[in-house]
Image (tube, rainbow, N blue to C red):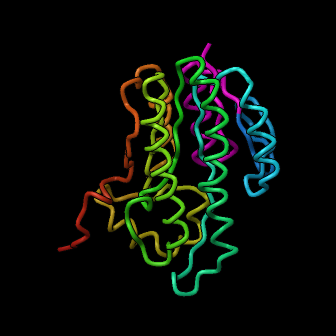
Amino acid sequence: MRRALVIGGRRGIGAAVVQALIDQGVEVAYTYRTAPGEIGTVFCRLDLLDRAAVEAFAREQEDAAAWDAVIYVSGATYDTLAAVMDQDAAEQTMQVNYWAFARIARAVIRPMLRARSGRIVVIGSVMGLHASQGNAAYAASKAALLSYVRTLAIESAKRSVTVNFIAPGFVDTAMLEPYSAYRSGIEARIPRGRFARPEEIAAVAAFLASPAAGYITGAYIPVDGGLTASLGIHRG
């Protein structure tokens, strides 16, 4: 049976990824930050802001048996104008969105390289390539994440390990609840006309984590309802 580890699998997209993998017959374990969820197997509590905890977790993974797939879902937001961005808050965003992944990926990929098999999937954001007012810190962290993913992909491809970046647009999760007053205006900008459901992001992640996706690596895959394909010019 294939084994997968989901970093941040308690709720939202993470919980949907856990369920999608279970539906494929994968044995799934996941980390959580505050409280465990109700599906899959709890692997451990992991606060990605805690650098010592991330380091300890990573060290354990370096010599462990290889996971067939590792999916990194966790993320942090920080919205403010670039001109007034607070460095401490921005560094926390970078720790969760970039540095924690970089350390964990360095650990889990070693057994994969030895096994000459593995899938690493990152849930990023369209903000990794596209600017948005008030998103300087968040976008910078996702852009760094994308660059790291692509570099790791080309460095590990010859040993049959794939690394890919999924770029959701607006997804109907708790992360976007603070923007509920703006939802109708945001949806008007999306060609598909609505936010994504977590299950729609999870379906792509589950495919990229599967044996069938062995020739896809270093990819940036937008799952955004056509948002980034649109020029943003509205005529209606």
Looking at the rendering, the stretch of residues picked out in magenta corresponds to 1-29
Left or right, residue 127 beside residue 229: right
- Total numbered circles: 0
Residue in front for this viewpoint, 131 or 197: 131
Task: Determine whether 210 is above or below 87 in the image.
Answer: above
> Residue 164's quadrant in the figure?
top left
Q: Residue at x 49, y 55 (%)?
A: 171
Residue 132 at what x, y percent from top left?
Answer: 42, 72
Residue 4 higher or lower than 88, as above or below: above
- Above or below: residue 19 compared with residue 56: above
On the image, the x and y values in percent for residue 26 come to: 60, 21
| Viewer-closest of 100 and 77 | 100
Percent of width and height locating residue 201: 47, 43
Image quarter (top left, top right, bottom left or bottom right) of the N terminus: top right
Q: Is residue 62 left or right of residue 197?
A: right
Which percent across, then down, holds residue 37? 75, 41
* Farthest residue, direction top: 1
Tell me the residue at 67%/50% (across/down). 100
Of all residues, the one furthest to the bottom in this rendering is: 83
In the image, taking residue 22 as reference, residue 155 lies left or right, namely left
Residue 129 placement: quadrant: bottom left
Q: Quadrant of the C terminus?
A: bottom left
